[in-house]
Amino acid sequence: MKLNVFAACVAAPMIASIALINVIDANPPYYVKPIEDENDYARVLELSLLFYEAQRSGRLPKSNRIHWRGDSALEDHGLNGEDLTGGYYDAGDFVKFGFTMAATTTLLAWGAVSWPEAYTAAGQLNEVREAIRWATEYFIKCHVSEYVFYGQVGDFSLDHTFWGRPEELNTTRPAYKIDPEHPGSDLAGETAAALAASSIVFRDQDPEYSARCLKHAKELYRFANRYRGLYHEAIRGAAQYYESTDYGDELAWAGAWLFKATNDTMYLEDAEHHYQHFHLRERPNEFFYNKKVAGVQVLLAQLTGQQEYQNAARAFCDFSVRQQKRTTKGLLYIDKFGTLCHAANVAFVCMEAADSPGIGDPQEYRQFAEQQIYYMLGGGGRSYVIGWGRNPPKQPHHAASSCPDRPAACGWPEFDKDAPNPQILYGALVSGPDEADEFHDHREDYVYTEVTLDYNAGFTSALAGLLQLRVKSTT
C-alpha cells in the first residue's frame, strides 16, 4: 500500500515458549498468559483496538493504556491557527493522512454497526467507539468551514529526517487543505462516509454527538459533490504515498452511507447515479483505501436488495474466493504492499456480503474469511500480529516502539539495531509475507514489516464478524 520508508510496525518481544498473550489489565505492565486457542477472535480484537491507542496523536486521556506513549504534536495547527491536534499517526512515522484515516474509520464503523454483539461479547464495545471517536473528533476539527477541510498534517520528507518518539518530534509540521479552488472529492467523500457511518455507531449511545457527525458528513458530501477533483492534486505530498486514482467510488460510498444514516432517498438516488455515471458496476479485484467499488456494491445490495448490486457483489466475492491468486499456503495475494491488509479487507467485505440475502454462498464466504484470518493469526506457521501467537514479528518498522523506556535517548541507532523493538505494539498487523509465503523480520524491511492504520481496519472488522458467528452459535 503506502510506499513510505518509515512506516508503523512494532516488534513483539521474545515470548518464545509462551504461545499466545492477552492484555488483561488496563494499567501497565500488561500481563502475559498462555492460552490454547490461537484463533481467539475476542482477544485479538482487543489487541487490534489497542494498536489504535498506540497511534494516537495529541493530548492523551487519563485512560491511556500505552505506558510508552504521551502527549505529542500539541502545536499542530492550520494556516490560520486552527487547532488540528488529535487524530492518528498513519504508521510508524508521524504524518497524519486524512484520506487513509477516514477510510480506516469507515471500515471500523461498518464492522461496529454490523456486529455490535461481537464487540459486546469481547468487552470491546466502548473501546471500538473510542477508537472511532478519536478519528471523528479530529475530522470535525479539520472541517474548519463548509468548503474547507484539512487533509494532512506533517510533511513526509521532513518527517523522515527524524527517528524517535513522537513526544520528541523536532520537525516542522505544515498543514494542507482542500477548498473550492483546490478540491478533493475523494478525500471529502471518504470523510463524509466515515462520519455518516460513525453517526450510526453513536446514534443510541450519544445522540447529540451522532447528530454532530451527521451534520459534518452532509456538508462534506456536498463539498465533494459540488467541487470535483482529486485530493492529491491539491495536497501534492500525498501523491507519492496515497494517490487516489478516481473519486467516483468515494462519491457513491458517501451517498450510500448517508442514506443508511438518514433514510433520505436523495442520498440513495445520488449513490445510484454515481454508480452508473462512474461505471462502478465492473468487477474489481481488490478493496482498500483507494478502491471502494466492492464496498459500494455490497452496501448498495444491503440497502436496496436490488439484483444488479447483488450480482455485482457476488461476482467480486466469487472471484476472490475461487479464482484470485493465492500463496502456496492459501493466503489471498493481491499486492506485496499490505499483503495481509488486502486479504483481510476482502475477507471482511465478503463477510458483509454473506450477511446479505441474495449474494452468493454465505457459508463459502465465511469459510474463506476464517481461512484468511487464521493464516494471519498463525495458521501459515507464524503469527503476523504483534504480540500474538507463534513467532510474531520482532523487528517491525515503527519508530516509537523501537525506543527504550524514557529517559533513555532514542534516534537512528535504534533504527539500525538488530534486536527486537523494546516496546510491544500489541495487535498491529504487519504488511506480511510475499507470494512465496516468505517473511523478512527486519526493521528496515518495511515492505514486510510496515504497519498502518488501514492495515488493521478490515482485519479488526473481520475479527468482529467471525466472533459474531461464534456468539450466534452459542445462543
Image (cartoon, rainbow, N blue to C red):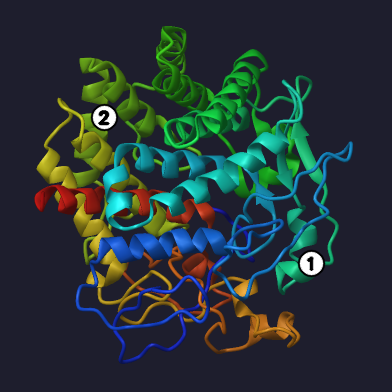
Q: Is residue 368 above or below residue 330?
A: above
Left or right of 2 in this view: 386: left
Q: Residue at x 23, y 52 (%)?
A: 466
Identify the disc placed on residue 169.
1
- State the image coordinates of residue 362 (x, y, percent, origin top left): 13, 39
Q: In this view of the protein, which residue sits in the foreground, 173 or 436?
A: 173
Calculate the distance from the C-alpha at mark 1 to the C-alpha at mark 2: 45 Å
Q: How many discs mark residues in the rendered view?
A: 2
Viewer can see residue 327: no
Left or right of 351 in this view: 417: right
Left or right of 469 in this view: 304: right
Do tag 1 and tag 2 residues touch (Cβ < 8 Å)?
Answer: no
Q: Is residue 197 above or below residue 394?
A: above
State the SS at label 2: helix
Q: Is residue 253 above or below residue 76?
A: above
Identify the disc placed on residue 23.
none
Q: Residue at x 74, y 64 (%)?
A: 160
Viewer can see residue 40: yes
Q: Where is mark 2, residue-wise?
A: 313
- State the image coordinates of residue 202 (x, y, percent, origin top left): 47, 35
